[in-house]
Image: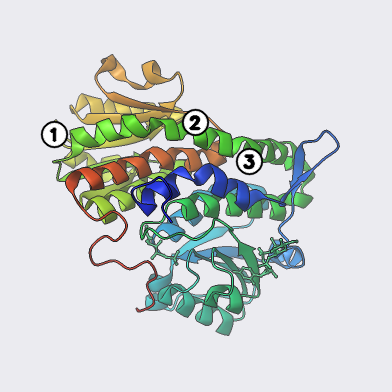
Amino acid sequence: NKGNYEHYMQKEIHEQPESLRTTMRGRLIRGGSCKAKTVLLGGLKDHLKTIRRSRRIVFIGCGTSYNAALAARPILEELSGIPVTMEIASDLLDRQGPIYREDTAVFVSQSGETADTLNALEYALENGALCVGITNTVGSAIARNTHCGVHINAGAEIGVASTKAYTSQIVVMAMLALAIGDDAISSQGRRETIIDGLCELPGKVREVLKLDQEMKDLAKLLIAEQSLLVFGRGYNYATALEGALKVKEVALMHSEGILAGEMKHGPLALVDENLPIVVIATRDACFSKQQSVIQQLHARKGRLIVMCSKGDSASVCVGGSCRVIEVPQVEDCLQPVINVVPLQLLAYHLTVLRGYNVDQPRNLAKSVTTQ
Ligand code: UD1
Ligand code: F6R
């Protein structure tokens, strides 16, 4: 049921304030001051000790689910102090990469049925790792075959392009980081700030959704382009990859997410006055580095669309020559949840304007059950 929306993708983008609320329901525990100060993930509470003792946490997934894990990696590293590595499920299997008994392997999958991810799960089980699932589908193969896990509870996702599952996956993995780091006194203040940030997140997502018309206008400008680059780094490297994935899979436009730190090692050669480039430059520890990236792209006459925190237009837009997308600022590790929304909206509007099928892009299936 699409309700008042024309497409499932549109509905699922706009229901993110609600889906995020459902994801967090019952999992943020309120302290005396009526503020949530700790997290409770029912599916993991008996396994946290084992996870804390593991030598490595390895995230395994495909597509958007992989990108969500990449977005959560920095906060998991920070709060757990455990090395976190990333594996695309098919690549882990192609290499038969090492997985050990001392590893915690986290399988991220909206459907819980993706063949590559399931095969990687079977492989990790054989190698004796603790296997944790993060899935949206109760009773799915990944939910059944992992030792423990967390349901993201985002509600059924129908559009082939994953949108609300992505933001709920990031929130669950941020809560996973909070739960694993729960015993460290030194980071208690940081954890409480993040929990406050989680409580406010649905409202901030509602705010960023107001950019809908602005993204439609931007899509009109980009309708006939061949390609779109998206630059990000740090917490928002994943946002760049995910924004580009949305644009290519539904709008059928070539798009590439680029780690801004790699700019000088190749991508800079592509920059000219024609190729549109989105640069994500919201406030966090990487902000000044992103400012310098913008200056260098600008010096090569790049066609820039800069995403920045509210009120920062003047500090990111050199000489006032670029287009700016201002988004509400939230805690750094939660910013990817906000920043992906305008890119989801952009991909949606580009698709509709270009006349393609939004909910069923050609050649793709919602659940990829073959290798
Ligand atoms: C559970 C109930 C929820 C209830 C809540 C009340 C279910 C599915 N969930 O939610 O309805 O409101 O208690 O306390 O009945 N699991 C895996 N692999 C996965 C995902 C989950 O093994 O990929 C396991 C978990 O370890 C857990 C169970 O499935 O044993 C349910 O997980 P989850 O729904 O996340 O647990 P709760 O949030 O506690
Ligand atoms: C992109 C998309 C795919 C899936 C991928 C994994 O919008 O939907 O990239 O993310 O096929 O699917 P799940 O999460 O079901 O394992």
User: In the current view of this chain or complex, which residue is farthest to the bottom?
Assistant: 126
Marks 1 and 3, how far apart in space? 39 Å
Quadrant of the image where one finds ligand 1: bottom right
Marks 1 and 3, the one that precedes in the sequence: 3
Where disc 2 sits, the SS reads: helix
Q: Which residue is mark 1?
A: 274
Q: Is residue 152 visible?
A: yes
Q: Residues within 10 Å of mark 3 (few under 14, many from 20)?
A: many
Expressed as whole percent of the image width and height from the top left, the position of residue 257 reads 32, 47
What amino acid does circle 3 point to? Answer: Leu
Q: Which residue is mark 2?
A: 207
Marks 2 and 1, how far apart in space? 31 Å
Going by the image, does 55 lie left or right of 28? left
Marks 3 and 2, how far apart in space? 15 Å
What residue is rendered at 30% in x and 45% in y?
347
Where disc 3 sits, the SS reads: helix
Examine the image and state in which quarter residue 145 appears.
Answer: bottom right
